[in-house]
Image: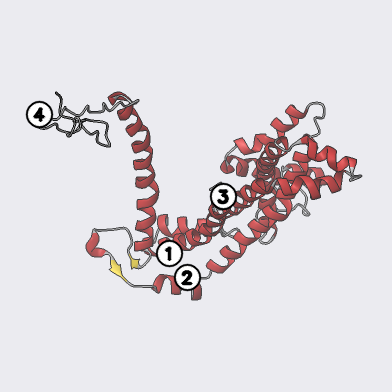
């Protein structure tokens, strides 16, 4: 007869699903999971090259020169000789810039004038052109191409073009005014005080097309139902734009602001082509080039100007990143 006092043995199951060892037996082998990768070895190599090469170029051409300029700004070095000729002088370069160097403050003033002209003249004009071309008028593609054409040209080419337009003897403007070749002819680029305004017109001519394209892209993405709802509420075109459409363009406005600030600070080509940034056209970028590549070759002094320009440029970049990161979904 069977003995029912001892229950039949049932091997327990552990959390992984494998049987526990039985008395006098050996635990079954745990089945190992097989790792599967979507990327092959060749894919990983290609991905490493696509990420690594641009990262190396960026670090080599951007970060290393930037850090080097910051370090050299506290030294006096003319670019000749090795490290033994580099002398640490602390903040003397910055003190000379602020207190002694005559072109520094006019250059800062000209850069801010450049920024003001871009912000309050070129940007509103580009926005106006974008609003007009957004109305699907006939030939809008042609108008967009013509207005955007100056953006394709470099500022050096723009400088050459406007030199011909502003030429005292045979320039278009003096000929249009009927004073070319007369004692009353105007030297637009040679007259201090007048040449900066003339150059700002030339630079603004190019900047308008850039701003137009940015705002036109933003206007194309605005939902038409917003305009229709505003029209039903009795809003006219001006009220619809400033109270409905313009607030929707907030991301575009931030991009335009950052681009405008950076463009005004990096301006260099056009003034250097005209008169090497002299006689009232001084800019911080020109002073950097003059000190780094000039006859004196003041590497440390020029690096100090570059660091100041870098600090001014970081402001709008931080603002843009802050707005972008704040608007990202969590």
Tell me the crowding category of disc 3: few under 14, some 14 to 19, or many 20 or more residues within 10 angstroms, Cα based: few
Element class at badge 1: helix
- Which sits earlier in the primary sequence, circle 2 or circle 1? 2
The answer to whether residue 116 of the structure is visible from this angle is yes
- Which sits earlier in the primary sequence, circle 1 or circle 3? 1
Q: Which residue is mark 1?
A: 304
Frontmost residue, 171 versus 158: 158
Q: Which residue is mark 3?
A: 324
Q: Which residue is mark 4?
A: 25
- Which sits earlier in the primary sequence, circle 2 or circle 3? 2
Tell me the crowding category of disc 4: few under 14, some 14 to 19, or many 20 or more residues within 10 angstroms, Cα based: few
Residue 77: image quadrant is bottom left
Against 195, residue 96 (above or below) is: below
In the rendered structure, find residue 97 and report the number of the disc placed on it: 2
Frontmost residue, 308 versus 14: 14
- Which sits earlier in the primary sequence, circle 4 or circle 2? 4
Tell me the crowding category of disc 2: few under 14, some 14 to 19, or many 20 or more residues within 10 angstroms, Cα based: some
């Amino acid at each position: 007869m069977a003995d029912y006092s001892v229950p039949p043995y049932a091997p327990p199951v552990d959390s992984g699903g494998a049987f526990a060892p039985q008395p006098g037996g050996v635990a079954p082998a745990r089945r190992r999971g097989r790792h599967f990768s979507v990327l092959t070895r060749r894919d990983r190599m290609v991905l490493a090259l696509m990420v690594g090469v641009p990262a190396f170029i960026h670090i080599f051409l951007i970060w290393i020169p930037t850090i080097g300029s910051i370090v050299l700004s506290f030294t006096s070095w003319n670019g000749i000789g090795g490290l033994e000729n580099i002398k640490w002088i602390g903040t003397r370069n910055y003190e000379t810039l602020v207190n002694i160097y005559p072109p520094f403050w006019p250059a800062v003033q000209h850069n801010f004038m450049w920024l003001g002209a871009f912000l309050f003249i070129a940007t509103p004009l580009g926005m106006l052109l974008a609003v007009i071309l957004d109305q699907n008028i006939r030939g809008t593609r042609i108008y967009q191409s013509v207005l955007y054409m100056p953006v394709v040209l470099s500022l050096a080419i723009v400088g050459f073009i406007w030199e011909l337009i502003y030429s005292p003897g045979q320039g278009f403007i003096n000929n249009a005014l009927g004073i070319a070749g007369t004692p009353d002819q105007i030297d637009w680029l040679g007259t201090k005080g007048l040449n900066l305004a003339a150059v700002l017109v030339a630079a603004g001519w190019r900047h308008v097309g850039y701003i137009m394209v940015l705002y036109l892209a933003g206007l194309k993405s605005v939902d038409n139902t917003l305009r229709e709802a505003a029209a039903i509420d009795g809003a006219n075109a001006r009220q619809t734009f400033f109270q409905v459409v313009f607030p929707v363009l907030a991301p575009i406005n931030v991009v335009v602001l950052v681009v405008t600030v950076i463009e005004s600070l990096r301006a260099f080509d056009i003034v250097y082509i005209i008169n090497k940034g002299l006689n009232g056209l001084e800019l911080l970028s020109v002073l950097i080039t003059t000190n780094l590549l000039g006859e004196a070759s003041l590497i440390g002094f020029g690096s100090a100007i570059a660091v100041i320009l870098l600090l001014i440029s970081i402001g709008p970049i931080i603002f843009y990143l802050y707005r972008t990161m704040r608007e990202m979904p969590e």
